[in-house]
Amino acid sequence: NAHHDRHVMFDEDHGLPPSLIDFLEETDHILFFLEGHAGKGLIQENEMGPGGQGMKPDLIVVTGDILDGMGGDFDQQIEPLKALSAPLGVFAVTGNHEYYVGMNRALTILKKTNLQMLNNERITVDGLDIVGVGYPGIHHLEEIKNLPMDSPSAAPRILLFHTPTNLKIKTDVRSGGH
């Protein structure tokens, strides 16, 4: 159980939405990095250590601004990201800082990490729906790949986005940057 200024860990002791309780009975922790800013050292290899109370999350999500700025040593910036791992995966969406770098260049850089980038798509991981909306966002739900329009999923759902959004989508947790 931890709350830290750079990330929030939710678990069954935090009054979660009922649809996530069953998921968390099978898994212990979901770690949210609300913004990465790897160049500023917000995600470090030892982040799961003393500051993170020794967390061993089952799932990690990052809601954009993974890279920092438009230049610098990106190989050095992403080094801590290579150490992020979780049994169910490490997922992220892009933010405006990736846009500043150039989306194609940023995605090429981020391919060197353990992050699975979600770009306007829904995936299901171990019974949990994760919907990732990349920067700059979308205007219509139809822009999200693999999102059933006719029958909402009964699975617990997390929405990841960088830019605040008013998407009319059933979610249990919305996690955004900016």
Image (cartoon, rainbow, N blue to C red):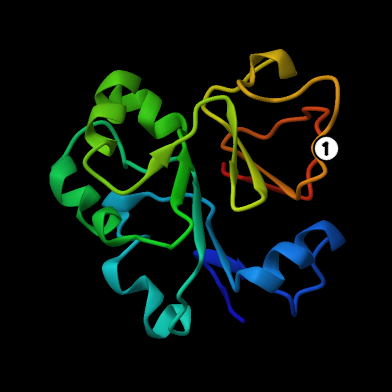
Say few, some or many: other residues with alpha carbon within 10 Å of mark 1 (under 14 / 14 to 19 / 20 or more): some
Image point (31%, 49%), residue name: 114
> Percent from the top left, x then y, of residue 33?
50, 56
Residue 121, position as x, y percentages in the image: 58, 27
Report x, y in % for residue 30: 58, 64
At a point 23% along the width and 49% down the height, the residue shown is 78
Q: Quadrant of residue 46?
A: bottom left
Q: Nearer the viewer, residue 128 or 97?
A: 128
Q: Residue at x 60, y 23 (%)?
A: 137
Tell me the element at label 1.
loop
Q: Which residue is mark 1?
A: 170
| 155, 79: nearer the viewer | 155
On the picture, is 10 further left or further right than 103? Answer: right
Q: Is residue 100 left or right of residue 118?
A: left
Image quadrant occupied by the N terminus:
bottom right
Q: Report how many numbered discs are placed on residues in the image.
A: 1
Q: Name the one closer to the observer, 41 or 112.
A: 112
The amino acid pointed to by label 1 is Lys
> Quick check: 130 above or below 23?
above
Question: Can the viewer see residue 140 in this picture?
Answer: no
Q: Could one spot residue 103 in this view of the protein?
A: yes
